[in-house]
Image (cartoon, rainbow, N blue to C red):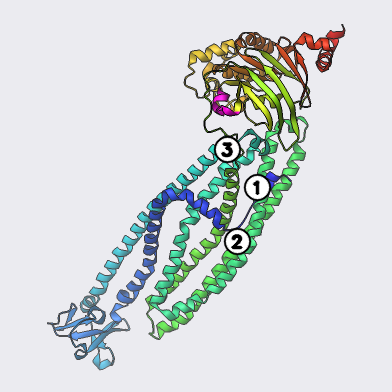
Amino acid sequence: MSKDFHEDEIMGKAYDSKLMKRLLKYAKPYWTYLLLAIVLMVIVTGLELLRPYLLKITIDDYINGYRKPMYEMELTAPYNGTIFQDKKYVRIDSIPKETQVNLSDYPLKNIVEDNGIYYLTDYQNDTINNRVILDKESYQNFRQIDINGINKISIIFIGAIILAFLFNYLQVIILNYTGQKIVFNIRQEIFSHIQSLSIAYFDKNPVGRLVTRVTNDTETLNEMYTGVLVNLFKDIFILVGIMVVMIKMNLKLALISFTLIPLIILASIVFRKQIRSVYRLGRIQLARINSTLNENITGMKTIQIFKKEEKISQQFDEINKDYLKTAKKEISIYAIFRPSIEVIRSLGIAILIYYGGGQVVSSYIEFGVLYAFIDYLQRFFEPILDLTEKYNILQSAMASSERLFMILDDNSKIENIENPIPITGFNGKIEFKNVWFAYEDENWVLKDVSFTINPGEAVAFVGATGAGKTSIINLITRFYDIQRGEILIDGVNIKDYDKYELRKNVGVVLQDVFLFTGTIEENIRLNNRDIDEEKIIEVAKYVNAHHFISKLPLQYKEPVMERGSTLSSGERQLLSFARTLAFDPKILILDEATSNIDTETELLIQDALGKLIKGRTTIAVAHRLSTIQHADKIIVLNKGVIKEMGNHQELLENEGIYYDLYKLQYKEAFFS
């Protein structure tokens, strides 16, 4: 299994302080937004915790308010109350604590209900003789305070719901906006960094893996920023808030409720341990599915040519079944964990009903307190479930961030010097002086290579596969740096030039032409607005591409599908010529540029090349010797060493490697 695949399996720690510190740096520019989101979340949490307390007040103070004792006072008493039979009745909770009135001088009364009839009686001495029947109007007068209180609580309750909705809406908008901005910046930084890396980096890292980093892994971080980082505060606020309110309402009931916490912690630890291994296995198997899909879809033509559909389908089916099995196991663990938490919650409610119900019947606590405790206990378990399930998101985010930082920390770049020599224009003289080059360690691809290409010369490189021809081209454009020796252009070491300016002046036509999704015109111009339509048509005519472009329905506006799949190999190659020549390079490099072209198209290109190479230093790499016979100089490479050098006729007369290659390609004509 490859090293790259192992990197896809990285799970790492569920929490890594160093990684988190680096991740928080991306959030730093948006700390005001995050702080505002946290403040709004605190407000929303407070409003949500307020609701059970409001219901508790409604039940105890107003619905059951008539049971509270009242002072029977003179009508001139300074407190608001209910008038009944020329006396004022003031409820005990309506009198301020700092009152100066001696309340012991006033008898305590209360209302009791018996067989649907309400009576006013002595609070501490309820007898039939002390009871006074209350008619409907009198009873309504006594309950007016409760009705007003219920109306007031209802308005506050509705207001709390509306405010919670509005603040929650703002918090979600701000949080997701911030999360998307952070992830946008991370994704932009990673893509920019990938663009700055040397070609050697892409030789070792599959494209599919890098695409996964820029898309899937950054999206995982978005889940962490929006789903974990800030919401973590919400869960903590809810837990702390509920515990504080419960302790404040009734310490004994609160302590009884908290006895369930060890069970919750134990269940969470067991769940976390079980889900970690299963989740990790699922990630590995999902990576295998993605890798298999990418490989097989890319090679679908080969699969169908060799009739391997059934075999490939069986292989994929096995991988898919493994992932299905793991997914089922993950579901099973959740299916045990969630009901377990529900059982613990139900157990807590049962204990509250058993103990608290007895306290209510014995009049030690009010019913509203018991109701609020049950409500708070139900809410208490929600953030615990949330925190446990966020463990997976946090773990996945740590793994994703580790993989992303591996890319960002990779400095496999072709570095520019601080003060590069400006390029005012190339004459086109290229010199290799004792160049040694290897892609890895000391597995030399070029060994002590030296040659000179004079301005305006057309030079061809020939040799067997692996001789080092393409490597020379890559070195001229500084896609790679040499280990020993020097490469000079116009007498200046190419390392002293700005690499981007250097590449602007070197036009390269590769064997495998890459076309971007867009139009014919956009693929020739490549976003350079200095190249107008007249120039595009002109270069297209030069390379004989205009004849097929003009036949397309939209001509130069014709859409190009991904990789130019709707165009033939020859047409793509012609567009590549037009694209290169539109930038008017001083040095022209043709890397097997006619290898994929039919004879008719090759004749068109050869006709164009005769005009195009004038005034330009041209380097050609070709396997077909017919395309390079008229080159000023032919350099024959073998295993990274220059074996022969001269023009076509000279090399044939030497009867060396070139002579042997020529005989192999033109055997029939040579001996006829």
Q: Position of residue 612 (x, y in %)?
A: 61, 11
Q: Amino acid at mark 2?
A: Tyr
Marking on residue 579: none
Viewer-side label of 3, 1 = 3
Seen from the viewer's position, the closer of residues 125 and 500 is 500
Q: Amino acid at mark 3?
A: Ile
Going from the N terminus, do you reach mark 3 or mark 1 first?
1
Q: CA distance from mark 3 to mark 1?
A: 18 Å
Residue 550 visible in the picture: no
> Would residue 528 appear left or right of 291 to someone viewing this image?
left
Q: CA distance from mark 1 to mark 2?
A: 25 Å
Seen from the viewer's position, the closer of residues 602 and 62 is 602
Give the residue drawn at x 19%, y 79%. Answer: 82
Q: Find residue 98 and report its image quarter.
A: bottom left
Residue under label 2, please give it.
Answer: 334
**628 above or below 396?**
above
Main SS class of the magenta portion in the image: helix
Residue under label 3, please give it.
Answer: 194
**Which residue lies most toward the right here?**
671
Q: Which residues are magenta?
A: 495-504
Q: Amino acid at mark 1?
A: Asp
Q: Position of residue 186 (x, y in %)?
A: 51, 44
Viewer-side label of 1, 2 = 1
Viewer-side label of 2, 3 = 3
Q: Residues within 10 Å of mark 1 (few under 14, many from 20)?
A: many
**Which residue lies most toward the left here?**
76
